[in-house]
Image: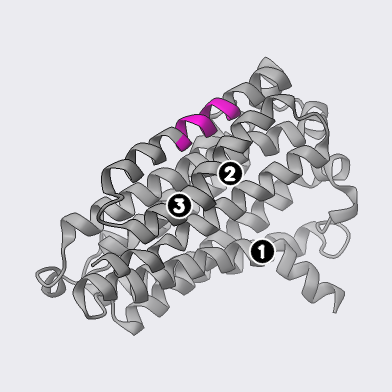
Amino acid sequence: MAVVIGFLQLIRLKNLAIMGYTQLLINFVFFQAISNTHLISSSIFVLYIISLLSIMAAGYVYNDFKDFKTDVVNKPKKLIVTTLFTIENTQIIYKILNTIGILFGVLLALQLKKPSVALIFIGAALLLYFYSKKLKQLPLIGNIAISFLISFSILVPLFLIPEQAIYISDSVFELFILGVLAFFAFFINLVREIVKDVQDIKGDYMLNMNTLPIIIGRKRTLKIASFLSLFLSIALMFIIYKYVLIYKAASFYLIGTCMLPLLYISYKLPIARTNSDFRFYSNLLKVIMFLGINSLILLPLSF
């Protein structure tokens, strides 16, 4: 039982569930509302979900494999690699999940008759590999890379719509809404990754990693994260102001669940000091992201 629980923690089941839930909302709520039909068939969607979640799970596994030395310092009580799984077994799990993800991505591309779509999944697997291998050790570059990957996953469904289905959908509106959502997903995850780097500074420093808080210090790093949170809340305020009369339900929902909490985080981050503080704000940012995704449920009320 401990091994099963450890495996689910290794692949970050909660994060995968949120990602899968997001894709379900996009395909079966958002696309359905604007076109009155499923723009992506069930068979294509199943292939996509298996590929996406397998590649992301593989990325989490490889990251834990590469980070087990820092995790000994940063989170010894949550250490999975070398306690529940050997390094060799962890590598095998990574290879299996990555192979499944890429294979289903290629099958998806063949099913759509769009070979170029396969490059999305192959590219995602490669980016996650290089992120854990090298990029995460570099100030901001690793944070930007992983944030880009998560935000881009929101746009991928647009590439899966068959050409014959495009004419029945409002592609401009789809692109705008998903683009806005991807924009906020990018910055929320960027802030969260920066906060996590501050939280893990002790272990990262011992292994000579060049993360942002190690290069410029905790205080300056937290000020940058605070500024990004403030920027995001202001950007959200302008978007809400522009569309509040059309999308009232979604606008008021976003004010309460995203804009105000982001303002709170921007105010509190510069004075955060303990790891429990950083953990709280990191989890709060994840909650804000989840709540923001759910605005897709409210958008159809305005159609």
Which quadrant is home to the C terminus? bottom left
Which is more N-terminal, label 1 or label 2?
1
- Picture coordinates of residue 280 (x, y %)? 74, 45
Q: Start and end of the magenta stretch?
A: 225-233
| Direction from residue 25 to residue 174 in the image, left or right | left
Q: Distance between the Cα atoms at labels 2 and 3?
A: 10 Å
- The N terminus: image quadrant: bottom right
Question: Looking at the image, which residue is at 71% across and 46% down?
Answer: 66
Camera-side residue of 13 and 249: 249
Separation (CA) of disc 3 from disc 1: 30 Å
Disc 3 + disc 1, Cβ < 8 Å = no
Amino acid type assigned to the residue bearing label 1 in the image: Ile
Main SS of residues in magenta: helix
Name the secondary structure under disc 2. Answer: helix
- Give the mark nearer the N terminus: 2 vs 3: 3
Give the residue number, with chain letter if any, for mark 1.
Answer: 11
Q: CA distance from mark 2 to mark 1?
A: 28 Å
Query: For the residue marked with disc 3, what is the amino acid?
Result: Leu
